[in-house]
Image (cartoon, rainbow, N blue to C red):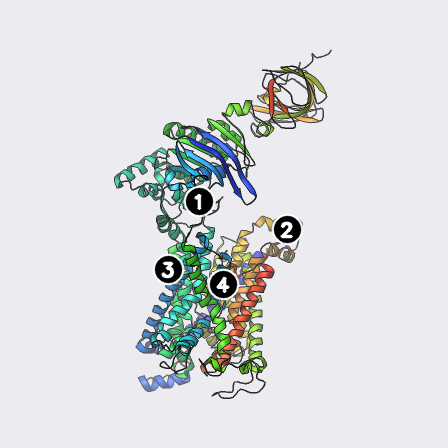
Amino acid sequence: MPSIVLTHVTKQWGKFIGVNDLNLEIEDGAFVTLLGSSGCGKTTTLRMIAGLETPTRGEIRFDDKIMFSSDKNINIPPARREVGFLFQNYALWPHMTVTQNIAFGLETLKWKKPDITARVKEMLDIMRIGPFADRYPAELSGGQQQRVAIARTLAPKPRVLFMDEPLSNLDAKLRGEMRTELKRLHKDTGSTFVYVTHDQLEAMTLSTRICMMNEGVLQQYAPPLEVYNRPANLFVADFVGNPSMNLIDATAKQTAPDEAEISFLGQRAVFRGNEPFRLPADSAVLGIRPEFLPITPDGGLEGQAYSTLPAGMETTVKIKLGGAILSAVVFGAIDYETDAAIRFSVAGDGILLFDRASGQRVASGSVLLPARKG
Amino acid sequence: MQANVLIVLFAVLLVILTVYPMYSVIRSSLTVGRMEAMRYNTLYHTKLSADDFTLLNYRELLTNVSTFWKPLWNSLRMSAYASLIAIVLGGTVAFLITRTDIRAKKFFSSVFIFPYIMPSWTLALVWKNVFANSRVGTGVVGMLESLTGICVPSWVVYGIFPCALVMGIHYAPFAYILIGGTLRNMDANLEEAATILQAGRGRILRRITIPIVMPALFSTVLLVFSSTMASYAVPVFVGSPGNFFVLSTQLTSLYNTMATKGQAFVMTIVLILFGVMLLGINLWFTGKRKSFTTVTGKSGQVSYIRLGRANTVISAVLAVLLFLIAIFPIISFALESMVEVQGNYATLTLKYWLSREDIGGFAVNAGKGILFNGMIWSALWGSIKLSLIVSLIVGTGGILIGYAVARKRGTRLAGLVSGLAFFPYLVPSMAFGAIFLAVSTRLTFLRGTLLLLVIVGSIKYLPFASRSGTNSMMQLSGEIEEAAVIVGASWPKRMLRILFPIQKSSFISGYLLPFISCMRELSLFILLTTSGTLITTLLSYFDEKAVTQMSNGINLLIVIIVLLVNFTTNKLTGASIDKGVGGN
């Protein structure tokens, strides 16, 4: 089973740099998500690994086998990389039935007739599309087409499976179901999955590792919870999480190796790091996840309810404080009168401090508000 | 609201314009004229008089091997070969341009359209200019013989070989536009998916690409086959002199003889039936369960097949081929219009262009040199006038039909209108002319008028305009217009200020194609008018009378005008012929 290693991979179209000096190691059996907004180079990266796109520079290896190297002038064609690829629009062949679509790859590999029949039957069963075996793609719904596409991709038992936003054409409910099944499929097949998406929730819930990209540059490559809890920089912090993290401009003055005095939105407080840190400059950004702003009657901060968005299971409360609007999340359904006074505090040791100039995370820790007067 | 009015209006208009002519031609095939009655009466001892009902026209024609069955067989063979040549040539070029890294794509792509823009007989004339020799036919010496002394055998100069080849080359651009359009629109992921599944180039081509472009191949065959069946000029130029007769040439000669007019209408019906049959096959084929609608998604750049070392060779071969079929004809016409003695390039003269005196030396009075020849100028003006009017009517009609059909899509009336608008496509030009001749013998006020030509031209060219109009209207969502309705814009304002500007280039293409087709049309009009009315009929007249300098010169004029109009429109508005026939 291969691990996939990319070293200094760059893709350039004229002056435009699609992917810039990307280094990445995808372990065997991992479920890696390439996450980013459209045009960030994630699809290009995937296509380069699959061999559908040729990098301008760099090297791509599957284990020790070089698939592409600009220095050594090696470029193994996609057909010989023995991978599976699931396209965003499924790319089912309109002139072939479901069975013919699934069997195509096996025929190409010169499998024996009975083996093909058996494998197609097996795939039809796994993907629960048996009743549609003789239909043409145009006669299937989006979700069914999706299943056929997966069946076709998995039939030759690829060791690596690439997926390019495979769920983006489905409706919300179906998307949820397919997510569950993909995760299951990953366990059952034991293959390596590389998955492209712009949906941070999909990345969070499915992957073993997230590769966060922006404008062709790798931002962070870490397990989902680490990306969520300890985002490397402001971009990642802002991109991951819904509702997104409150990013508040602050000034900070270091008072001890693990302590700083901060002021933000007209408040003064002490930031205590979980470990020692060093602030490069005074101007900083405070990052607080909505769930770390609990609404309590004895909270140290007072703001006004700007608007309340109850979703049933939880409620997002938008609180106006010192000219900014903060998001807080409360379990259960509450509805506040517009402009009603709300007291809340900053809780936990998952509060982040970023350097404003570089956008890099400097520390994580807790915020201690001064004791409430009167 | 406007869409409702339009759809009803067009439904009524199209029913009248297709049903009445059909009735008229069927009626004419079942009745006899005075001369025919006399002939039948002596032959079969019948007692027919003019306008009597009889089946004798059918019996006469369908039992005659030399005027019907043999020409029919010739027509079918010629059309089959021409379709094959067009598909192979056009399809190969389409594949090279859309799927490989061949050089100078833009140049090849625009020059390859030339043979289609030029009149179909253009290449036939060139063929004659080059290969005619002293041992064949009238013994005129062609370019090849005069330069090298080689005399090619008769079957090369006249007969099915040059007919099929010329028609095939003329329609190859059409195959290129249709097949190339499909290839370009085809989701690259479809081929990539097969690549990933380890299929080789050949297997992908055979199992994925070709099946998916099959419908385009089929419509090309349908079109080329029925157009070739109907073509008149080419078989007249390079067929008839070698005693190679086809249905369209027979139709004309039957028609021109008073005593066989009725049979000409029988033959018209046969030609229409062939058209309907071909459409039926096409519908049956595309109506099968497989849907070929290509889901367009995010398809990355197609990875071009690298031709490698072969690139230069293939590019060069293509360049030579294009020179022969697109550039050389123009040179050839210029040369042939400037030689005193055909084939003798020592006798170059500008007399046929510049003479202010009458040019003597022919069986007919050719008049003055081309640039000062009143007959030519008035015929040219006649053609331009006709083409302008027809293109205005057809282009506008196409847009309005497109609008009405797109807004009322799914309704029965919309189906009827788009079906009827397509009908003239099935009727060969020659037969179309004959039908309206039958009409004009009843509605005598139409006979020989410009109005008749305008009506015929407008109906004949409606299919393409309505197809491109419908395509571009379908691409516009109703919401775009509704947004204008909300702010209270009137219907004309919505059409002129919103819809037209958005699809400008494809609408203008809808005007361009009928103009060009009309400028170079011969077979549609030849039955309906006298030789001096249109530049094409005049050309045919000069050719018939062997005034080759004049016919070549006129041909050069037509080619230059048509190319000029095409390129200026293309440069100014982005409209192009390929958009007019539904390519991209």
Q: 10 Å neighbourhood of mark 3: few (<14), some, or many (≥20)? A: few
Respond whether the residues carrying marks 2 and 4 are from the same subunit.
Answer: yes
Q: Nearer the viewer, residue B369 or B456?
A: B369
Q: What residue would you read off at disc 2?
A: B485
Please report whichever mark, 3 or 1, sits nearer to the chain's N-terminal start. 1
Give the quarter of the figure containing the N terminus of chain A.
Answer: top left
**Which amino acid type is shown beneath numbered disc 1?**
Asn
**Disc on the earlier residue, 4 or 1:** 4
> Which image quarter: residue B380?
bottom right
Figure check: A75 above or below A337: below
Q: Nearer the viewer, mark 2 or mark 1?
A: 1
Mark 2 burial class by Cα count in 10 Å: few <14, some 14-19, many 20+? some
Q: Nearer the viewer, mark 2 or mark 4?
A: 4
Would you name the residue on which mark 3 appears?
B281
Q: Is residue A255 above or below residue B271?
A: above
Kind of residue at badge 4: Val
The answer as to whether the residues below labels 3 and 4 share one chain is yes
